[in-house]
Image (tube, coloured by chain):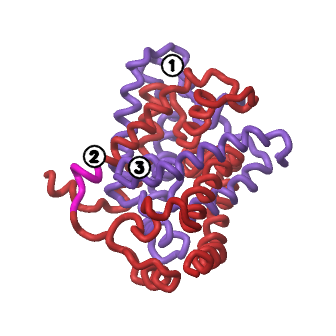
Chain colours: A purple, B red
Amino acid sequence: MKEDKNPVCDAPNELIQKESFLSNIKYLIVGTLFGIVFVKAEIISWFRIQEMFRMQSFHMYGVIGTAVVVGMISLFIIKKFNITTLNGEEIVIAKKPFSKGVIYGGFMFGLGWAITGACPGPLFAQIGSGYLVVIVTFLSAMAGTWTYGLLQKSLPH
Amino acid sequence: MLEFIKQPWHWSIAGIFIGLTVPVLLIIGNKNFGISSSLRHLCAACIPANIPLFKYNWKNEMWNLFFVVGVLLGGFIGTFWLGNDAEIQIAQSTIDDLRVLGVSDFSNLMPADIFSFDNLFTLKGLFFFVIGGFLVGFGTRYAGGCTSGHSIMGLASLQWPSLVATIFFMLGGFAMTHFGLPLIFNLINK
């Protein structure tokens, strides 16, 4: 396991070998399972997010806490036993760079999370669950990302 | 078996599945888990407008778009094929608090008095869809990740900037819930 100090984005593809368009189907399948979990554990619920920010239920803290611990143990095992990708490449973890944006942007996202009851993942699952009006929220999120791109140079980092 | 799956799932089951996404994506294709990147890839693919943030080989990151389409499909399957008719069990204290704010429908995952097309061109829609969504998209990109990229992938790989990000996600959420939402509901209920 090694670190990519200068990743192209925050969730980069670190595979060296080229993949065909269709081989991406496996990520679609993982995403589908992920979406099912989102719905069945009610993570996409606006009410669950409200419970979390009002500290009136342990549910969301339990979900995120368990996920972090399971992820941490998994990465420890990968490192310890030099586990590689299926095609034998060394596993690469992208570095998370620090800037003031982590603070300002993080706070802004938190504000939006409590209004919409969704982080980017649940937005997609909410639309799939039939809350079609969330398409508007999604388009507005895209506009937000685009506007950040436009203003990036003039914002404090 | 199917009846078993159809019940709402315990938080620990969900946590294990979500946590396992991290090694599964790495092992099947050396992909770092994170979802807000998809918004950036979509901007890069559709409206790059010569902005430096959107000038990169987004096609090499196509997996992320497949992943989020999967999340959408999973949302559909989880609701319409594996769903159950039971009402969501929300903490009574949360219900009481939200009733005070003016929320009255607690039967579904989302409050029908907010998340409906009837509210699209109202003040409610402006806050809950347009401004809320904008903050999510702008904030996650400014912070370099969201709950998945920072709070799960970043914390699991012991990176301190992700801890800072997670703390500020929570602070923003607390601030909006306890100070912002009362003001917003006051405005839209007038």
**Other residues around mark 1 within 10 Å, as few (<14) / some (14–19) / many (≥20):** some
Query: On the image, numbered disc 3 is attached to which residue?
Result: A127
Query: On the image, numbered disc 1 is attached to which residue?
Result: A89
Q: Nearer the viewer, residue A17 or B180?
A: B180
Quadrant in the picture for the C terminus of chain B: bottom right
Query: On the image, numbered disc 2 is attached to which residue?
Result: B77
x and y percentages locating residue A72 in the rendered image: 51, 46
Callout 1, which amino acid? Glu
Q: CA distance from mark 2 to mark 3?
A: 12 Å
Q: Residue at x 67, y 40 (%)?
A: A146
| Left or right of A43 in this view: B31 | right
Magenta stretch, residue numbers: B77-84
Q: CA distance from mark 1 to mark 3?
A: 36 Å
Q: Nearer the viewer, residue A22 or A115?
A: A115
Figure disc tally: 3
Q: Secondary structure at mark 2?
A: helix
Q: CA distance from mark 2 to mark 1?
A: 34 Å
Callout 3, which amino acid? Ile
Q: Chain of mark 2?
A: B
Nearest to N terminus: mark 1 or mark 3: 1
Inspect the magenta stretch and tell me whether residue B78 lies in it. Answer: yes
| Left or right of A123 in this view: A155 | right
Mark closer to the observer (1, 3)? 3
Inspect the magenta stretch and tell me whether residue B122 lies in it. Answer: no
| Left or right of A12 in this view: A29 | left
x and y percentages locating residue A11 in the rendered image: 58, 35
Q: Secondary structure at mark 1?
A: loop
Q: Chain of mark 3?
A: A
Q: Quadrant of residue B6?
A: bottom left
